[in-house]
Amino acid sequence: MMAFFSHARFYTMIRKGAEEMFQHKTGHIKSFTRQWQLQSMVIPGIVWMLIFCYIPMFWLIIAFMDYSIAKPMLQSPFVGLKHFEDFMTDDRFWRSIRNTLGMSSIKLILGFPIPIFFALMLNEIRNIRFKRTVQTISYLPHFIAWTIFGGIMLNWLGEGGVINQLMMALGLQDREILFNSDPKYFWWITYFSDTLKETGWSAIIYIAAIAGIDPGLYEAAELDGANRWQRMWHITIQSIRPTIAILFILAVSGILGSNFEQIFMLKNNMNLRMAESLDLYIYNMGLVSGRHSFSTAVLFVRSIVALGLLFLANYTSKKLTGDSIF
Amino acid sequence: MAKRRRFRRIGVFEVCNALLMLAVCFITLYPMWFVFINSFNAPQQALLGTVNWFPKAFSLASYSVVFNDKTLMNGFYITTMRTVIGTAVHVLFTAIVAYGLSKTNLIGRKIYLKIALITMLFSGGLIPTFILMTKLGLYDNFLVFIIPAMYTFFNMVIFMSFFRTIPDSLEESAKVDGASDYGVLFRIVLPNSMAVIATISLFSAVYHWNDYYQGVLYIRSQDILPMQTMLYKIIAENSMSFMQQQAMAQFGARLPGNSIKFASMMVATLPILVFYPFIQRYLVKGVMIGAIKG
């Protein structure tokens, strides 16, 4: 009797639970169909992401295969870590790592403070009209295509170009230098052309952050006898510190990246030794030489290291300053 | 620095700072001015990139070569089509997805947002993407400019955060009147979001107009090559179209005609320069929204 009772209770419980589950489910399905319009807005986007973002992610597995574009994906033979071993022993790979780190470091160390400095100096301009005009002009080059801007740079740096004329007029060099074809100038060309093109644009975020500072702070500091530089240091810089931290994180985590459009435009066969960044190496190996699996192996490692760098930079910044991106 | 501080009262700092800003303006503007003046030089004159302020011998010859060059003009047309269609599709698609995702009662919203976020952190990269385009038949196809550029996470987030600032009461009253979700989106939400639509449109249009790399990667046929990719080939690879070679022979230039290069550069940049006042106004706004979100 006892057993039957408990059995019956058990049975009821299961039935009730199932009913609840069922009701819950139908409820979900009902409200899902009720919001079919909203769903039909979102689902195409998700499908787009699955196709254009997730399928390429999945196809990173060709790094472990001898993939040929003519055959269906999974019919290519698995070769394990062969391609990884190949690129680890390729001098050209290490050269591209050196070039990428070299160019990124120059941009990071010498380039990162420039927009901050520009924003601080612009902030000291009292005449609003002049200030706004300078700002508007300063980010014009950002909207000029790299084909155009790179074309100007190539022209200026060439034989008889603006740079040679200028340097000779200033007495800094006594004869023409072919900046474009001498590899040793390439890193500096990327640095200077990038600074020339992007300083004004990069400063926008700092200018916006500075504009958000409470003017009362400056008044109080002035009453306390703080001079211009003290105010700049203790109020302006301290107030925009979170912005600086976040942009620094992004810059550090992007150290394996390079401005591909810029390098692709400025490189040539003569300066390739110093110009071939990791991205360009992947391009040259994968699409010019057709070694798809090999370059994908490089891509694979690059993506993982970049992701790791992002998390590391984020963690460091959180520990040091309390600010982070996620 | 210390010296300047002492003279602060008589305004040495202000003067230096103003001069610095003028120098920045000069450095920024001179490259475009350089292209401008050299494009008006007679083809024989602009052989070298010498420093100058005005054309040495004013001539429209380079422009007539550029405007008569069918290949280049076709590139101009392709770039225009790409910019118009690409921008319209991008804005419409991204806005619709963002509107759906902005609704907190959307079933599966958390999962959708996770799917979207992961695409920011990790991507397949160049080679797998290239293979995908080939398999989808987008290689050497005009649609390669449109479909892969239909959506970006960044712009979706900008749209989404903007849509969430639109008061619910506005949408509710339309719903009460029997409007569907699409009705609300197209009749209430989008007309109230013109500022953000303008911003994203300009972001997208500038990208489409300036991009040369997609054309280098995916396009082989001359007749769907965008102008910027042609410029890349003319400038970086020194290749010239038939018309230009003819012009070169005609003008007897020793080097590839720089003034013709400059004239094509000018033609390719002119739309950007003309729209620049609008662009800068809205793009700066967009960066602010993005910055606040990020």
Image: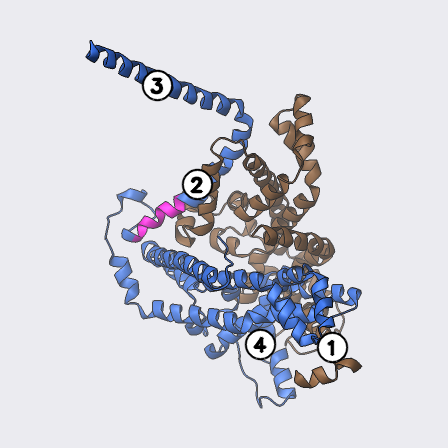
Chain colours: A blue, B brown
Q: Does residue A27 show up?
A: yes
Label 3 near label 4: C-beta < 8 Å?
no
Q: Amino acid at mark 4?
A: Leu
How far apart marks 3 and 2 lie (CA) works out to: 37 Å
Both on one chain, marks 1 and 2? no
Specify the quadrant that holds the N terminus of chain A. top left
Near-viewer residue (B279 or A160):
B279
Mark 2 lies on residue: A51
How far apart marks 4 and 1 lie (CA) works out to: 26 Å
Image coords of residue B32 (percent x, y)? 68, 67
Residue A243: give its label. none
Image coords of residue A15 (percent x, y)? 32, 15
Q: Secondary structure at mark 1?
A: helix
Give the label, 4 or 2, closer to the camera: 2
Q: Is residue A189 above or below residue A265?
A: below
The chain identifier of the residue carrying mark 4 reads A
Crowdedness near tag 3: few (<14), some (14–19) or many (≥20) residues, C-alpha within 10 Å: few
Mark 4 lies on residue: A157
Mark 1 lies on residue: B19
